Amino acid sequence: MNGISIRPMFIEDYEAVVRVWQEAGLPFRPHGRDRKDRIEAEMEQGTAVFLVAESGGKIVGVVLGTHDGRRAWVNRLAVSPAYQRHGIARRLVREVEARTEALGIEICAALIESENEASMAFFGSIGYLHGPDIEYVSKRRSADT
């Protein structure tokens, strides 16, 4: 799809980003990890590679990339349904990979819920390997984080 540009996300993009998440069917936690102030705090830490895809000035895709200095993570990847299947998600992920590789980070990973077959297929198609011997555990202060 021509006319799509990728650029850094600004906090002023927050409402448009939430709209993309909602249109794409991503769960939204407005009182937890997806709160505007939390997103802004992450952006200020220097470990965020938050990007948006635009078409005609409208945000149509988003990815929240992060890193811990050793490994990069692809989070909250979404594209508005009308713009899906045009390579936008692939471009967003590739840009996170390029920006984190420029920092010397050689591993990029994504956590995908087991039942999300579309995401599993997408990441497989762009070279990500499924590690069935790896289990993800987390400790949360609340169900909304």
Image: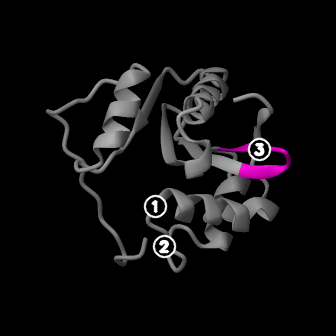
According to the picture, the residue beneath numbered tag 2 turns out to be: 29
In the picture, the quarter occupied by the C terminus is bottom left
The image quarter in which residue 123 lies: top left
Instruction: Check disc 1 and report its element: helix, strand or loop.
Output: loop
Relative horizontal placement of residue 56, taking residue 34 as reference (left or right): right
Relative horizontal placement of residue 142, taking residue 28 as reference (left or right): left
Q: At which x and y percent is residue 140?
A: 34, 69
Q: Are marks 3 and 2 in contact (CB under 8 Å)?
A: no
Instruction: Check disc 3 and report its element: helix, strand or loop.
Output: strand
The image quarter in which residue 35 lies: bottom right
According to the picture, the residue beneath numbered tag 3 turns out to be: 54
Q: Are marks 2 and 1 in contact (CB under 8 Å)?
A: no
Q: At which x and y percent is residue 39?
A: 64, 63
Label 2, residues with CA under 10 Å away: few <14, some 14-19, many ≥20: few
- Which is in the foreground here, disc 3 or disc 2? 3
Q: Amino acid at mark 1?
A: Gly
Relative horizontal placement of residue 5, taking residue 98 as reference (left or right): right
Magenta stretch prevailing secondary structure: strand
Q: Amino acid at mark 3?
A: Glu
Q: Residue furthest right?
A: 57
Instruction: Check disc 2 and report its element: helix, strand or loop.
Output: loop
What is the number of the mark on residue 136?
Answer: none
In-front residue for pair 100/19: 19
- The answer to whether residue 77 is magenta is no
According to the picture, the residue beneath numbered tag 1 turns out to be: 25
Q: CA distance from mark 1 to mark 3?
A: 19 Å
Label 3, residues with CA under 10 Å away: few <14, some 14-19, many ≥20: some
Mark 1 vs 3, N-terminal side: 1
| Residue pictured at 71% horizontal, 68% vertical | 15
| Residue pictured at 39% horizontal, 23% vertical | 125
Q: Which residues are magenta?
A: 50-59
